[in-house]
Image (spheres, coloured by chain):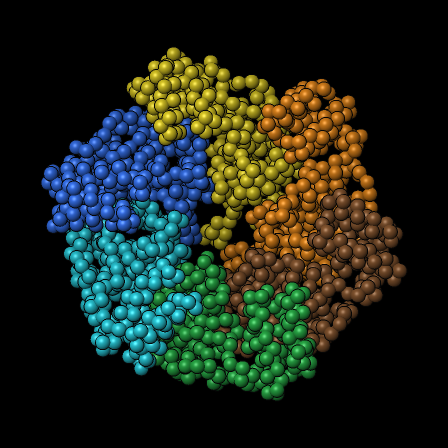
Chain colours: A brown, B orange, C yellow, D blue, E green, F cyan
Amino acid sequence: MTIDQYRLSEEPAYHPGGSEIAFYEAAYGARLPVMLKGPTGCGKTRFVEHMAWRLGKPLVTVSCHEDMTASDLVGRYLLGPEGTHWQDGPLTMAVRHGAICYLDEVVEARQDTTVVIHSLTDDRRILSLEKKGELVHAHPDFQLVISYNPGYQSVLKDLKESTKQRFSAVDFTYPAAAIEASIVAAEAGIAQAAADMLVRIGEKSRHLRGQGLEEGASTRMLIHAGRLMNAGMSLTDACHHALIVPITDDPDMRAALDAVVAAHA
Amino acid sequence: MTIDQYRLSEEPAYHPGGSEIAFYEAAYGARLPVMLKGPTGCGKTRFVEHMAWRLGKPLVTVSCHEDMTASDLVGRYLLGPEGTHWQDGPLTMAVRHGAICYLDEVVEARQDTTVVIHSLTDDRRILSLEKKGELVHAHPDFQLVISYNPGYQSVLKDLKESTKQRFSAVDFTYPAAAIEASIVAAEAGIAQAAADMLVRIGEKSRHLRGQGLEEGASTRMLIHAGRLMNAGMSLTDACHHALIVPITDDPDMRAALDAVVAAHA
Amino acid sequence: MTIDQYRLSEEPAYHPGGSEIAFYEAAYGARLPVMLKGPTGCGKTRFVEHMAWRLGKPLVTVSCHEDMTASDLVGRYLLGPEGTHWQDGPLTMAVRHGAICYLDEVVEARQDTTVVIHSLTDDRRILSLEKKGELVHAHPDFQLVISYNPGYQSVLKDLKESTKQRFSAVDFTYPAAAIEASIVAAEAGIAQAAADMLVRIGEKSRHLRGQGLEEGASTRMLIHAGRLMNAGMSLTDACHHALIVPITDDPDMRAALDAVVAAHA
Amino acid sequence: MTIDQYRLSEEPAYHPGGSEIAFYEAAYGARLPVMLKGPTGCGKTRFVEHMAWRLGKPLVTVSCHEDMTASDLVGRYLLGPEGTHWQDGPLTMAVRHGAICYLDEVVEARQDTTVVIHSLTDDRRILSLEKKGELVHAHPDFQLVISYNPGYQSVLKDLKESTKQRFSAVDFTYPAAAIEASIVAAEAGIAQAAADMLVRIGEKSRHLRGQGLEEGASTRMLIHAGRLMNAGMSLTDACHHALIVPITDDPDMRAALDAVVAAHA
Amino acid sequence: MTIDQYRLSEEPAYHPGGSEIAFYEAAYGARLPVMLKGPTGCGKTRFVEHMAWRLGKPLVTVSCHEDMTASDLVGRYLLGPEGTHWQDGPLTMAVRHGAICYLDEVVEARQDTTVVIHSLTDDRRILSLEKKGELVHAHPDFQLVISYNPGYQSVLKDLKESTKQRFSAVDFTYPAAAIEASIVAAEAGIAQAAADMLVRIGEKSRHLRGQGLEEGASTRMLIHAGRLMNAGMSLTDACHHALIVPITDDPDMRAALDAVVAAHA
Amino acid sequence: MTIDQYRLSEEPAYHPGGSEIAFYEAAYGARLPVMLKGPTGCGKTRFVEHMAWRLGKPLVTVSCHEDMTASDLVGRYLLGPEGTHWQDGPLTMAVRHGAICYLDEVVEARQDTTVVIHSLTDDRRILSLEKKGELVHAHPDFQLVISYNPGYQSVLKDLKESTKQRFSAVDFTYPAAAIEASIVAAEAGIAQAAADMLVRIGEKSRHLRGQGLEEGASTRMLIHAGRLMNAGMSLTDACHHALIVPITDDPDMRAALDAVVAAHA
């Protein structure tokens, strides 16, 4: 798998909500590691895709999870007809070839995964492939980006303070209403008026957060509703299947969300 | 194993209970991932079989469990006479060849399994075979479907919010009495009158749910009772072995269920 | 290992206690999965051996345990001079060749083991060998039987509701006194009068259950005592070594059991 | 490793404490599995060695522990120049060649280990080598013996009731004073009078059990003290190093034990 | 990978804060193992780099983590065309070739890792490669250094007393203001005045430690802020992204830190 | 690795504190297993080295840890060009060739490790290499020695009573002042007067044990301080780095220890 597989062939649409592009360009210029903070489905992944395209760098994305080990990132030996040969993992590929490496929800990964990035996030910028006996000096274009959802952390599962301090960080949240509506209209292929209605419903649902709802409707979910409308469903049915049923089974909460939709249908 | 193994050769019988077919067609049209919510044995698996047949797509079904890893879904290297070779897992096969992939009771699987589907459930529609060093772009026909039983979830074991938000969803429940009776009669090969009695018994047993019974008799269990009747057992004996003994050992609950059966025998 | 290894060469003695043979024949006729419920040592294993002999089918028995995995049931790759080759596990062998597969104390096994049987216990009757990439359609003679001891289950360790509902079930308990005595006499090779005494002692010990004794003497243990008598030991000594010492170290309980024996010696 | 390695070349000295030899001969005659119950160091291992010598059978002893798996007992595949070959484990070797297999402290082993012996401890007398695909029918001389220390069991770690019921059992305890003294004199090579003193000290120490001492001095420990005396140490020093320092660091308990020794020196 | 890979090619800048260089030289002269104690980001890693350069020795650095095993340090067998061959781990390489081996955050590693260093930290100075069957006597130049963050230890996770006692130790803390400012100015490439402001902000943030902030801004973080300023960001924005967002999401704490920055902007 | 690697080439200095040499010679004469009890750093390892040199036997030392398995002690199969071959572990090497095997801090090891030594510590004196299918009879010179730190044991982690009873034991503690001073002077190469001062400081620090200090300064730590003095540091600085900083971060305790040092400087 060559690194070119990881170049974005077309510009990912992105609607900036503030100065995050300027910050990212400064951080990339200084090759500071970057942490993107914010709730799920608000556009963090899209932002890093956009920046990779803008800076003309390949982007290697890794979705982290509880069972991910350092070997999954760094690489491992595989057995072939001539004995074992080494295969670079996604992080090593990015380090060698100067890609942006995006570790999505890094706090989910095991500790060995977060420690392996330490020597890449200070001025050493090296990656030690201990199993291979190789010290890889990072390509000048390499940068590390991680995402972090503050709402999910707990005492038991959080980044170590010595990891956090290695990153510069920027907050993300849902886009402002006008921006969000134009995103929904564009991505779902529906009329602006319908998108406006969906965004108003989404904002109302976010007010219910913490009152029995873990999170309100994300931008992603509004786009889902829009796509169902584009396929011919009514606003009410589309919201039912895309915004309500996926996230709650509580009858009172469902009734409250139904009322929100009815008020805009 | 070619993908053709996974094509359904004949139409799976399905009796719609509402607008679920229209919803599914809209969701499939937009290639939205779909979540089927509902209790065990109410027909979710049959519905997805029916839709796969209706849409003319192969269906790859995976029963998830606690010890299932991402490798079980994605694939792994096997050792042959020429060294190792890669074997696609069921998810990868569905992604490459444009099947519907149905992950049954996905919440049972380990976290790495739910994370691996993230990049398939947004507009990237890619699957990263990290061990193989390959990025698979999903076939245009590929769609992901999961089932979810709201009655089973707990704080400790639930889908992450960032996973739920990636799906459009539809509720399932037991069919209405007339529909359920015709299903039982057809599948068990018994007379309509007998099926009617079984369905009435089933409905009564569902009222006992939460009063010491975890769930009432499912459609599947009514069919079991019908088959024992078809093999010559009396209604009473068939209900005893198919509806009562399998689900409870509590003497009071057994007496209550016996009384329900006696009232209809 | 051919399937013929699993055919029973002579009829296993079995003394029916009720209508369990008729039920089993109806369930086998409809190919319904069967669950045998009852305490340890009351004859469940012997019953399924008897039915396999009666129906002329091979019987593959697997004792389940906490460390058993799906691979132990389904099969695995082994390394030979030509690289790896697949070896069917006991369940796969039964599925392919039309045996009755008996999973003894299935609740002890890990969750992946109980999930692997799901597609075999509905009308699909298929077994997916995911590691091999093969879908095995069950032989028409194949049937699945499991045993389940209600006295052992706990909240932490029980079959999932969605598993229980897939089975028809029948209760087992210790045989009636006259039947049990003839079993003990026949299996231990002792006189009917001695067997009668053992059975009366056994019944008394079962009344102590829950008063400090987890279970009373099973039929199996009465046969053990009979065999020690057949080898020349007195009733008192045989009961001491076969019925008392194995199951309790509590001095009061031992005294109570000694008194029961003394009353019949 | 042939089975002859496991034959005892000379008679292991054993001083019977009651009717345990008669019981064992009856149980072996009926091929009943045997459980030896009693505290550590009281002669259970020596007894089974003695019986194996007396019956002229090889004896395969396995010390069980928490990390022992069924494969450690049953066997496994090893990789050689021609690919893998099977190697019988100690249990399989005993089953094939008609040895007595002694599982010492079986309750320490993992559950899969105790379940693997189930089919060997009823009238099936078979061992299923699932990984090899072989059903081994036990040699007519094979017998299974386990040891069990009642003082060590807890709710969390005990044999399952369905395992216990498969065994006939006999209690062991420390030998009577006269017998114990002649054992100590013979095994340590010291005079009878010195052995008598050690046995009196040992009995006193056993009275302290439960008053801060987990167990008193076992026969084994008295022999240790005798051997140190045989090597020239005084009774006081020998008891200090062999009976006191190994088992307690509590100053009060040490003082109490010192006083016991001083009273006999 | 030869040991020369681990020689530092240019002098790492280091500003001494006290007598730590004299101590280190004395400890290295006596080949005493050294423990560097202090908070994250205060310059421990830089110090050991500086000392390795000063003493002209190669430096092998290992970032420890929860999943690190003794094999990761010592080495392992790898499979090649001629069968397995041994590959030294980073510790073994340092021991053989006379490097300084720096185990960063050693308390994170598993116990086997800390025990493996015991025989290297007393006058034996040997490393036993048990899997290889080799006793390696340490090169005369070899020395072991570990880092330890007192703020992170807990009862559950601390070095064993018998490990701590093997080390001589020195405390580290943040540099004095003047020194820290010149470090920040030099490393970030900003004017002295700007660096002074950042250091004053850093000191204020450290006073908030324990009042809702796990740690204040480290020297490393001040350098990050300086680099963002060097890339054109304002002091306020740079501090926001480098000092505040990475370490806290608490609105009150953010407001307090914002106020600190505003007071110096 | 031949056993000769494990012979000590010169006499390890040892200053006896009591009758421990006579005890050890008697125990070795009777080939009784020996347990050395005492705090860390008081000379247990040095003692066993001294005795091995005195008796002219090779000494195989193994530092035990939580992740050590029986295979690490006993041996394992390694893969070579001709398939697998067996490699003896350190215990097996000692058993075969008549070395003293010293298991340092054996209580840290996993249970399987302590059980594997059972058959070596009674009159069987055999080691069963179950994976190799070999029974090794111990060389007549073989002896087993373990160390045990009473201060570290807890209910959760202690030797099993049935393991303890297999050993004769001797207590160790810090040497008397005059002996300790001559050890420190000799090992650190400092004047007797300076060593006397260090020993007095050490004794004072041991009085603080249990008042916030887990253990006081061990003989080993006093030697460390002496070596730093030998390298030119003052008594105060040497004690700071060798006796205080490594073991406590508590300000009050540090002040108390500083005062102890100041009183002797």
| Residue situated in front as seen by the camera: D225 or C184 | D225
- Residue E202 vs A200, above or below: the answer is below
- Residue E125 vs A140, above or below: the answer is above
| Quadrant in the picture for residue B92 | bottom right
Q: Position of residue C132 (x, y in %)?
A: 57, 48
Residue positioned most to the top: C193
Q: Position of residue A67 (x, y in %)?
A: 56, 56
| Residue situated in front as seen by the camera: C102 or E40 | E40
For image coordinates 58% across by 61% down, the residue present is: A158
Q: Is residue E136 left or right of residue D186?
A: right
Q: Is residue E255 left or right of residue D262?
A: right
| Residue situated in front as seen by the camera: D219 or C17 | D219
Q: Is residue A65 something one can see in this rendering?
A: no
For image coordinates 23% across by 54% down, the residue present is: F170
Q: Is residue C226 left or right of residue A219?
A: left
- Report the quarter where the N terminus of chain A lies: bottom right
Q: Is residue E202 left or right of residue D99?
A: right
Total number of numbered discs in the rendering: 0
For image coordinates 29% across by 39% down, the residue present is: D209
Q: Position of residue A61 (x, y in %)?
A: 64, 65
Q: Position of residue B102 (x, y in %)?
A: 69, 48
| Quadrant in the picture for residue D226 | top left
| Residue situated in front as seen by the camera: C109 or A240 | A240
